[in-house]
Amino acid sequence: MLSSLLNILWVVLGGLMMALGWWLAGLICAITVVGMPWARSCFVIGRFSLWPFGQEAVNRRDLRGRDDLGTGSLGLIGNVLWFLVAGWWLAIGHLSSALACFVTIVGIPFGIQHMKLALISLAPVGMTVVPVRNV
């Protein structure tokens, strides 16, 4: 219940703009055949950026206990290329949104979420989004 309320506030107060940024990056990547692995990551993280509360981004290696194409050495190369081309732009967007959220006490949870998304935007290849486990 609380995560749904936070997600609605998130979308209304600026989360939609960052999700649109992720999806735009995904569309630009999807235009070329070479950019398809990044496009998939952009759309997954873009959906997470639109509705982040109640979910978390985790490394697929940690989740499944084994490497795959995006978590091995090719994933590392992909993340380096991503950072140089688009990752730092999305990170700057999330960091500036976080600073704007940290101005008020009510915005602190949203600022924290933007900080998490800024870290994810630096290296999204090999990440997946899963529901938060209640421990």
Image: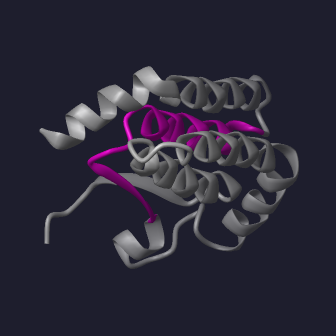
Identify which residue, 115 or 65, lies in the foreground: 115
Q: Main secondary structure of the magenta part?
A: helix
User: Which residue occupies 56% across, 60% down?
Assistant: 126
Residue 32 image-quadrant placement: top right
Residue 41 image-quadrant placement: top right
How many marks the image carries: the answer is 0
Please give left or right for residue 14 compared with residue 10 in the image: right
Identify which residue, 58 or 32, lies in the foreground: 58
Please give left or right for residue 99 compared with residue 10 in the image: right
As drawn, the residue found furthest toward the front would be 104
Residue 76 image-quadrant placement: bottom right
* Residue 40 counted in the magenta span: yes
Q: Quadrant of the C terminus?
A: bottom left
Identify which residue, 52 or 24, lies in the foreground: 52
Position of residue 133 measured from the top left corner of the image (x, y, whole percent): 19, 63
Does residue 24 sit above or below 62 in this rendering?
Answer: above
Position of residue 120 measured from the top left corner of the image (x, y, whole percent): 59, 56
Does residue 102 sit above or below 64 in this rendering?
Answer: above
Does residue 80 sit above or below 92 in this rendering?
Answer: below
Please give left or right for residue 41 compared with residue 88 in the image: left
* Residue 76 counted in the magenta span: no
Identify which residue, 126 or 110, lies in the foreground: 110
As drawn, the residue found furthest toward the right would be 84
Q: Which residues are magenta?
A: 35-59
Applied colour scheme: one colour
Position of residue 39 measured from the top left corner of the image (x, y, whole percent): 64, 36
User: Which residue occupies 57% across, 39% down?
Assistant: 40
Position of residue 8 measured from the top left corner of the image (x, y, whole percent): 31, 26
Q: Quadrant of the N terminus?
A: top left
Does residue 120 sit above or below 43 in this rendering?
Answer: below
User: Which residue occupies 54% across, 34% down?
Assistant: 43
